[in-house]
């Protein structure tokens, strides 16, 4: 603005060649300053050399405008302008050499002009030049020191910011990227439309090690697991920890599904090798679920949900393996997510309830107990199938809350029943993997004042197969308190007879798949007879599940069964109907067949 004003003044007061010379110089300076202001200095970062050059050019233009004007119109009183330019130039230079040059040029010019004046004036201007030089150098030193302090402060701040960012993006225990950093990278890959695979790895058996040996050993084991995974040095792979014993991997590039499954199994096999930690030989397994961008989802959240769904499938059906999400399961997954959301948002205390199915003793001709069956009436979803909401509760971490609510309701009903009637209650895999939760169930029994011998906890083979040793320990605690333990769905798993030997059992429930075929399958009939005989020899009670017809019962009666459970003797019923059945049988026994004496 100043040099535009100067240009206007030259236009008003100058003529001919002087006008062109001085006005052109000031106008050019104004345009150059405008360019610097609007483009060069407001664009990207400048190198030190570029910044030094810009400072010299600015000082040079200030100097040349004054020099040309005094050359055309010399005024002795305006020689002090060179001293002012020296002072100004000392604050705009970024290097000592530029400072010396920018100060020396105007002061030397001042001396050159003053040398043509009287000795007295020359002496005065020399004094002014010396004072200006000292002041300019002092000011340059002060400005430079201030600039260096600001630069040091900025560098320190940048370094601390980078360190804070690293800390914010790094898992403090293992040193790998944390959940935030991993999902930042996923979001970046999604924005760039670069294909990749997301895999979630969950350790099998880690919680038991953590509970038995403590958190220090557990933390060391997690670090060793991460070292194993990262030492594989898979090209294009990024590993991170998203919490607890759950890890995530990103495989970038156009990898085939078969290749990803192979990479996932390589990681699982490496993780599953024994770990020598503090004189211990520790072993954990792993399962993994994978999803792909962009074919299986358009966002990090969608990909995570599908990888997590595949992981759950791996843990429940193919433990120790890598499972890729099947796009045909989209509707099933969406339904599962709806159920999980309703579980989180619902009032489970009022929405969850129990129905009871009787267990009938042919020998006593009466009902001797009931199995508590979980039911859920959701205000948003309506009645939800038990297998669906139990599975969703396990995936979302709500299963213990569900178990706790239903168990309290079961105890409340059991308190209204006669002492000779028992209650059978189902526990999930997560329930029997947590000692604190098991102890809380025992605490509820003590508070209710009910004899533990009237309570039976049912477990399935799949619930204990992930960590048999830990499950056995917790089940022994339940049994030591006086509670009974039953193995449900016997014969539907892979190695049932091993569990008969290793678990502290009181009862075995034969899977209904055998019972339903006894009328037409000799093999099923002999299997049922063999299991009944085995239970007698092992002093286990035996329940035949799923007995629905008179024809089935006619065949089974010859096998001298211990207990029968099925629609033939009662469908799942409300607490009121169960209590009515108990009261009615004392005067009117439930008789469907003639007594079946048990052999000695």
Image: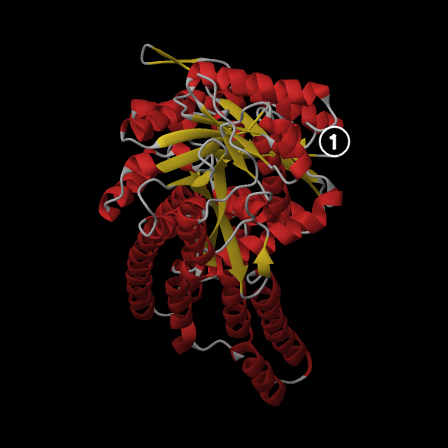
**Residue 275 vertical placement versus 44 (above, below):** above
Residue at 48% x, 39% y: name it: 359
**Residue 144 vertical placement versus 426 (above, below):** below
Q: Quadrant of residue 290?
A: top right
Report x, y in % for residue 58: 52, 62
**Residue 264 vertical placement versus 182 (above, below):** above
Check the image and name the residue furthest to the bottom. Answer: 12
45, 243: nearer the viewer = 243
Residue at 42% x, 62% y: name it: 350
Quadrant (top left, top right, bottom left, bottom right) of the N terminus: bottom right
Report x, y in % for residue 181: 50, 43
Report x, y in % for residue 225: 46, 23
Q: Secondary structure at mark 1?
A: helix
Q: Quadrant of residue 170?
A: top left
- Residue 229 in view (yes/no): yes
Q: Quadrant of residue 137?
A: bottom left
Residue linked to disc 1: 257
Residue at 49% x, 35% y: name it: 246
Check the image and name the residue furthest to the top. Answer: 279
- Residue 219 in view (yes/no): no
**Residue 224 vertical placement versus 192 (above, below):** above
393, 268: nearer the viewer = 393
């Amino acid at each position: 603005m100043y040099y535009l004003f100067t240009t206007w003044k030259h236009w008003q007061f100058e003529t001919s060649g002087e006008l062109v010379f001085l006005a052109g110089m000031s106008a050019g300076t104004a345009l150059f300053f405008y360019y610097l202001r609007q483009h060069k200095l407001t664009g990207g970062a400048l190198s030190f050399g570029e910044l030094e050059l810009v400072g010299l050019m600015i000082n040079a233009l200030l100097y040349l405008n004054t020099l040309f004007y005094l050359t055309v119109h010399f005024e002795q009183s305006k020689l002090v302008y060179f001293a002012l330019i020296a002072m100004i130039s000392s604050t705009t230079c970024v290097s000592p050499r530029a400072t010396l040059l920018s100060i020396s040029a105007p002061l030397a010019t001042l001396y050159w002009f003053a040398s043509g004046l009287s000795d007295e004036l020359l002496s005065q201007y020399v004094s002014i030049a010396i004072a200006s030089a000292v002041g300019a150098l002092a000011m340059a030193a002060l400005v430079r020191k201030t600039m260096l302090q600001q630069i040091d402060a900025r560098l320190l701040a940048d370094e601390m910011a980078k360190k804070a960012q690293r800390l914010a993006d790094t898992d403090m225990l293992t040193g790998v990227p944390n959940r935030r950093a991993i999902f930042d990278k996923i979001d970046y890959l999604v924005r760039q439309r670069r294909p990749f695979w997301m895999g979630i790895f969950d350790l099998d058996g880690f919680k038991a090690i953590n509970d038995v040996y403590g958190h220090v050993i557990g933390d060391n084991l997690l670090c060793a697991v991460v070292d194993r995974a990262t030492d594989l040095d898979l090209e294009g792979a990024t590993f991170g920890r998203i919490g607890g014993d759950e890890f995530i991997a990103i495989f970038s590039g156009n990898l085939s599904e078969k290749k990803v499954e192979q990479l996932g199994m390589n990681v699982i096999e490496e993780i599953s090798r024994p770990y020598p930690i503090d004189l211990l030989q520790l072993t954990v397994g792993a399962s993994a679920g994978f999803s792909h961008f962009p074919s299986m989802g358009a966002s990090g959240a969608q990909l995570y949900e599908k990888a997590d769904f595949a992981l759950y499938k791996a843990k429940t059906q193919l433990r120790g393996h890598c499972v890729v999400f099947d796009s045909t399961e989209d509707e099933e997954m969406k339904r599962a997510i709806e159920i999980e959301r309703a579980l989180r948002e619902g009032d489970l205390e009022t929405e969850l309830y129990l129905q009871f199915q009787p267990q009938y003793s042919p020998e006593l001709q009466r009902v001797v107990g009931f199995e508590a069956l979980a039911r859920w009436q959701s205000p948003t979803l309506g009645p939800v199938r038990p297998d669906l909401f139990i599975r969703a509760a396990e995936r979302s971490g709500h299963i213990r809350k569900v178990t706790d609510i239903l168990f309290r309701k079961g105890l409340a009903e059991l308190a209204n029943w006669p002492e000779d009637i028992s209650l059978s209650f189902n526990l999930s895999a997560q329930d029997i993997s947590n000692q604190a939760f098991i102890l809380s169930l025992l605490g509820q029994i003590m508070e209710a004042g009910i004899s533990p011998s009237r309570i039976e906890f049912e477990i399935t083979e799949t619930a204990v197969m992930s960590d048999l040793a830990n499950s056995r320990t917790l089940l022994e605690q339940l049994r030591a308190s006086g509670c009974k333990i039953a193995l449900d769905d016997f014969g539907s798993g892979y190695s049932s007879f091993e569990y008969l030997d290793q678990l502290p059992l009181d009862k075995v429930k034969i899977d209904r798949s055998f019972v339903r075929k006894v009328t037409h399958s000799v093999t099923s009939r002999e299997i049922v007879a063999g299991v009944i005989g085995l239970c007698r020899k092992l002093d286990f009670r035996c329940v035949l599940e799923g007995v629905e017809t008179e024809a089935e019962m006619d065949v089974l009666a010859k096998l001298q069964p211990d207990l029968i459970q099925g629609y033939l003797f009662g469908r799942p019923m409300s607490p009121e109907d169960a209590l009515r059945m108990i009261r009615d049988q004392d005067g009117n026994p439930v008789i469907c067949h003639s007594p079946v004496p048990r052999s000695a």
